[in-house]
Amino acid sequence: MARAGLTRERLVRAGAELADEVGFEHVTVSELARRFDVKVASLYSHLRNSRELKTGIALLALEELADRAADALAGRAGKDALDAFANVYRDYAREHPGRYTAARLRLDPDTAAASAGGRHAQMMRAILRGYDLAEPEQTHAVRLLGSVFHGYVSLEAAGGFSHSAPDAQESWAWILDRLDALLRGRPAG
């Protein structure tokens, strides 16, 4: 019989909190059992293994991130939408570093197709429609934006910008201005 109060959803949420505290790479069913003060075997009626737990955390993170992005994009277009979308990713990574890492977990094709990952791509393409990019340029732009957002956030999280001026926020704003100019096909000022 499953322990009262333990559900797959509760375990995944607790795993996400654990990921934010200790790092996604350190999340295991064993560590989660310690948090709930139960035997590991009692969690196996809810989760098969650590991979299933990590997949659940990744799916939760993708859903949370997509919901935040959708809220931030409502009523916005062009540069305003680009800034809002980028800032959602940066803010989420700062607030939930373990979950942000989890959102990058490689999922099997069926799980990925059923995840909120598709919503992220749809929102990014909606933003890019305002820049009037045809294929394959639109796909190139999706990859460029994803690479820049993730690269910047990852370097910032690792302390890569804390040792010199200008401030990381100033650089972030500059980068978003340059991305907007690039996507509009005009030279950066």
Image: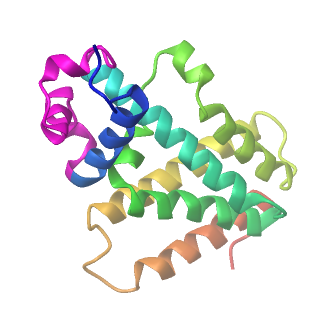
The quarter holding residue 165 reads bottom left
Residue depicted at x 74% and y 63%:
81
Residue depicted at x 49% and y 62%:
90
Please check the rendered image and state whether residue 33 is part of the magenta-colored stretch, yes or no.
yes
- Residue 34, position in %: x, y? 12, 37
- Which image quarter holds the C terminus? bottom right
Magenta segment boundaries in residue numbering: 22-49
- Residue 113, position in %: x, y? 61, 20
Query: Colour scheme of this structure image?
Result: rainbow
Residue depicted at x 69% and y 62%:
72
- Which image quarter holds the N terminus? top left
Relative vertical location of residue 183 with respect to residue 143 in this rendering, above or below = below
- Residue 128, position in %: x, y? 78, 50
Left or right: where does residue 124 sit relative to residue 19?
A: right
Relative vertical location of residue 182 with respect to residue 106 in this rendering, above or below = below
Please check the rendered image and state whether residue 87 is part of the magenta-colored stretch, yes or no.
no
- Residue 33, position in %: x, y? 17, 32
Residue 51 visible (yes or no):
yes
Left or right: where does residue 149 sit relative to residue 130?
A: left
Residue depicted at x 22% and y 36%:
27
Q: How many marks?
A: 0
